[in-house]
Amino acid sequence: MKQRITYVLPEGSRVESSDVKVDKDSLKFDRADEAAKEWRLTLALNDLPDEVREGCSWAVEHLANRSRCKQYSAIVMSFTVPLCDLLRKLLGVTAKCHSIQESFSSTPKIPERLAITTTWQYFQYAPLSSRLGEIFLSKACNTGHPDLDACAFAVRDLQRASYVEFDFEAIGRKLEFTAVWAPQGPKQNRAMARRATRMIRRPKTGERTEVGTLQVEKATEAEELSLGGFLTVIGEDDHPSKTLFSFPSRHHTLPGSSPVTFAASFQQPTGLHPKFQIKLPRQQLTPPKDTCGLHAYWTLPSALFIDRYQLSDPLFLASQNLVALHSLSGEQDLEAPNWVIEQWGSAALFELGAPPSSQIGSSTQKSDWIITIPTHLRYLAGPQKPTDTSGHASVDVPWPIVFWACEAEEGLEMSNNPFDRVDLGYDRLFGPQTTFYHIPPAPKVNTTVEEIKVPVLDSEKAEWVRAGTLIAVVAGFAWICWQLLRATSGQNFKAQKQKRK
Amino acid sequence: MSMLSSFFSSPWLVFGAAILFRLALLIYGRWQDANSPIKYTDIDYLVFTDAARFVARGQSPYDRATYRYTPLLAWILIPTTWDTEAIPNHIWFDFGKVLFAAGDIATGWLIMRILVKRKDMSVQQALKYAGLWLLNPMVANISTRGSSEGLLAVLVVALVWAVLEGRIRVAGMLLGLGVHFKIYPFIYAASIWWWLGSDPVSDGADALTKTKAMFTKERTALAMHSFMTFMALNCVMYSFYGVPFIEHSYRYHFTRIDHRHNFSVYNTVLHLNSAHSADSSFKVESLAFVPQLFLSVGVIPFLLAKKDLASTMLAQTFAFVTFNKVCTSQYFLWYMVFLPFYLPLSSMLRNSRLGLTALVLWVLGQALWLQQGFELEFNGRSTFVPGLWLASMLFFGINCWILGVIVKDVGSQAGFERTIAAPEHKKDR
């Protein structure tokens, strides 16, 4: 097991050597509450908690066999059961996951990428379950650990993480677990702040624990990030070593001090065809470079869907301030109700229209630039709780990610980045030499999830409907038969006699 | 009124007006498509033309999602993919709409011929009734938007014409083609069968003779030709496209249950049963065809076919659509094509108050339903129950009442159409 912990202070701050106190087998960083933190744990297969190991063992066995076995589909089938169980344990009960074949969607391959394997994708809006922390608690903080309390706190702190990533490498038989926390900010109460500065101790088993206490520096090359500060390997170093390094990065924030953010909402009332609006400030919407396109990547739950045929007409797209729907994967059935859909939903990559350059600098156009994405709702089953008689169910839809995608400078080796993140869902849809400049959301009420109220058929009134329909059909049928017989009965005999004559 | 009378006395004027009307709509449709994000062209037309493009490239039309029709339709629309010097592709693209509109005109012409020749009407009178179809804005709109219902109308009216002319083998082939195209024309087999009549038998004949008399030369010819045409078309299509052809062209239509709201009286129950499959005790899906087929293939053709074939077909189709599990406004065209044949003997025309009431109620029933549908789709109000359900029940009731009037009118006709209108058939017997 290897650990790598990185603290990063924002640009402008400076880590002093006095902030980092190194001991024989521990380290204390005084400014931990101001810093963003990344915790990376590399575990061999045997070090994994039992629940996780089961799922990963299957993966190793079957991915290794794939080169020998010609039937690809058979392998995926046997891979499915443990993975969904694993997800259910980690994500909680509501996961709509039965098997990879049924519940996952496969992301489309683009020509520039020579990927041989298909990537499978699954997305669900769900709070990070505390189970995740508990599972790792047992392994990372074993009885040999010198400071169980601190370790336990660190693991439970996973609830607060901005994101958590599992990266399983079948060939090396190891799992890389990464968790990242945003800086705590001044609002945190003192107790929390104090606990965060607690020491990081090296586990008794003596695994390598590397701690970086860094600040952001101004990068010299374009599209690179630069970090400076101190690196320490607990147990091996008796004082922190100064360091300064740069590396190319795929993902960036917008350059300059422009506070561009986007807001998103559904047009009310939503009806069965909700129109999603992304609002951007018209004046500051300049691309960071010439080769950039403004994009949005949106994952939709299965209750909502996008009609790709509707979005293939250029006139229509222009009227919504869209340029194109570049990719749509997942469940795209236009007619099926939600209760027969087995996949988790769909993911779409849009290229958004930007306001004409004449409008960007001018002060006359003060209004927001609004981009509209038309969506449609599938029929939902009625609410589960019998007390909810409003006739509506609710669906949570997360905001999309909005970014400028630009061609990277030539010759940049993106994998040199020690904090590199790949396979985020949308990055595979672009060429390998692409940089992303993210536009952050400006959430109202501190949330980036929209809730839609969807009209549903209440099963409370079922009895009336069934009985009423039956009566109506029988009555209508009887009326018609009666009219028929009345009109033809007297005449039938006479007419037949006439015919025979 | 005399201007109206002189208008209807000239076939050139009436047909000319119908053609100009459709031409104007086609041109307007092109303008709207080019200039507005809301398109005039029907979504179905885009499905057809996409499928035609696949076929033109040698692929299967079923590669196009939601293409649930016979490959024949994609085949005949191949010209929409052409691109020549003289006529660029964006003009060829409208070929299908032109074809469907031409089908309307052909239908109108056939209606006129039948009324003049078989019902002893004057040209002027016949044109008035045919005008119900030719100058009907709903019909013209549907065809010029690219919906293929117009083609069925030609087939069905040609079927009536063939039977009344005594060309039973042609009728059989048209019937086979019609069933291959849209399945529902199989109901006309029943009315034509009874209309053709059985061979005369003496009163004292035994059961065997009576049974043999039921299978006349004409009836056998009808059955054989329709079956052979139907199977020949199926074999050809299957050999080209295999199982997807069976799946999309036939199986889909039998197993589909459109939850999305439509006029059908069963719609709410089907929605309920599907969403809450645990509590469904009443198997609506399997029982709904009982009243539908009992009426449309059973009693209506048996009792009414001999009186008037085309009016019976109207009653059959009306019953079929009204009692169907799915009902959309395109289906109304299926029975509207028979109106010019039924109205001359209808009490709704003789008693204009009755006729007007029927028309107003029929339109009102749809309007009420559409209003509830609008509230659901655009304002997000849960109008499933009671709104949409009651509106569909009301519309169902209105349709049953109208059907009652139709069957009463046809049933009260004296004598048989065949013996009165076509004495030459008597000679053949």
Image (tube, coloured by chain):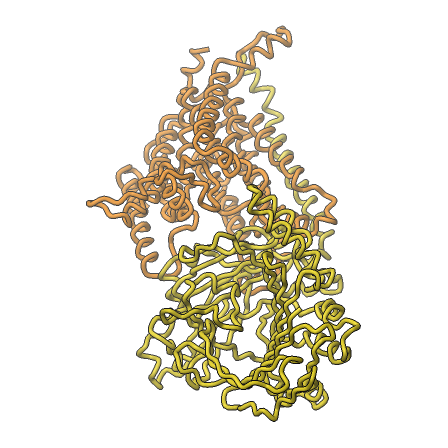
Image position of B7 (left or right of B312): left
Horizontal side of A185 relative to B338 (left or right) equals right
Residue lying farthest right? A143
Q: Residue furthest left?
A: B86
Q: Position of residue B386 (x, y in %)?
A: 65, 57
Q: What quarter of the picture does the N terminus of chain A occupy?
A: bottom right
Residue shown at 46% from the left, 76% from the top: A247
The answer to which of B260 and A493 lies nearer the viewer is B260
Q: Is residue B38 above or below residue A209?
A: above
- Chain B, which colour? orange
From the top left corner, tell me how far across and down residue B83 is, in percent: 26, 45
Query: Can residue B406 be spotted in the picture?
Result: yes
Of residues B276 and B327, the one nearer the viewer is B276
Q: Is residue A125 above or below residue A223?
A: above
Please tell me in which quadrant of the rendered image residue A181 appears: bottom right
Tell me what residue is drawn at x 68 percent, y 74 percent: A158
Residue A471 occupies quadrant: top right
Q: Is residue B175 above or below residue B332?
A: above
Colour chain A appears in: yellow
Total marks placed: 0
Q: Is residue A302 visible?
A: no
- State the residue in front, A206 or A16: A206
Whether residue A256 sits left or right of residue B275 in the image: it is left
Rendered location of residue A232, percent (x, y): 60, 82
> Which x, y percent locates residue B120?
38, 27
